[in-house]
Amino acid sequence: MFVGFHERQLDDKGRLALPSAFRTAMGDSCYLVYGEERCIDVFPAEAFEDMATEMMRQVRARETTLTRQRAFAHSATLVTLDKQGRVTLDDRLRQYAHVTPSSKVVVSGNLDRAEVWSTDLYEQIAAAGRGAIAGGRE
């Protein structure tokens, strides 16, 4: 389970140190993929592969589109955590999520995955979520 909120900063090479609690759940490698609302989703390898299998089933059953499957597959990158628990966010992923090398980011848990957000986008999403929990009152 991925829960919580962690402020981090990318280094000048675009590397991100995952929170220690998340490293254990990720194992040695994980997938980085375009997430909803311009975050970067970080999935343990096994969870990603299960999700990909389910997406292929949905395409065959016409429950989702081949276009969505392609976009999902094209955006995915398998990465290995280094000895410091860092992963490299490549240029394509950083552009998608509106982050740059050396920028501050938020790494948050979303139960079955971690998410990497620009601080500005995260605050918008977090405010909307707090409002929903509070019955529409932020």
Image: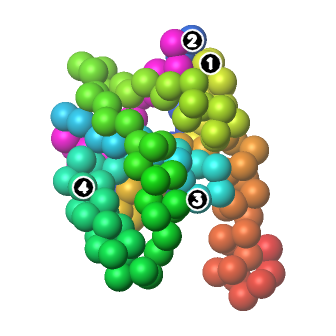
Q: Amino acid at mark 1?
A: Ser
Q: Nearer the viewer, mark 3 or mark 4?
A: 4
**Tag shown at residue 36:** 3
Which residue is located at x 64 percent, y 81 percent? 133
Q: Residue 62: horizontal and vertical position, in percent? A: 42, 80
Instruction: Give the Cα distance between marks 4 and 2.
Output: 30 Å
- Of marks 1 and 4, which one's residue comes earlier in the chain? 4
Disc 3 to disc 4: CB gap under 8 Å: no
Q: Are marks 2 and 1 in contact (CB under 8 Å)?
A: yes
**26 falls in the magenta region:** yes
Q: Quadrant of the C terminus?
A: bottom right
Q: Nearer the viewer, residue 26 or 98?
A: 98
Q: Which mark is residue 26?
A: none
Q: Which residue is mark 4?
A: 49
- Tell whether label 1 touches label 3 (CB within 8 Å): no
The answer to whether marks 3 and 2 mark residues whose Cβ atoms lie closer than 8 Å is: no
Residue behind mark 2? 12
Q: Which region shows up in magenta?
A: 13-27
**Number of callouts:** 4
The 10 Å Cα crowd at callout 4, few under 14, some 14 to 19, many 20 or more, is: few
According to the picture, the residue beneath numbered tag 1 turns out to be 102
Residue type (three-letter) at the residue carrying disc 2: Asp
4 or 2: tag closer to the N-terminus: 2
The answer to whether residue 114 is seen in the rendering is no
Amino acid type of the residue tagged 4 in the rendering: Glu
Would you call the spot at circle 2 few (<14 residues within 10 Å), some (14-19), or many (20 or more)? few
Front label number (4 vs 2): 4
Q: Earlier in the sequence, mark 3 or mark 4?
A: 3
* Inter-mark Cα distance, 1 to 4: 31 Å
Reading the chain from its start, which is encountered first: label 3 or label 2?
2
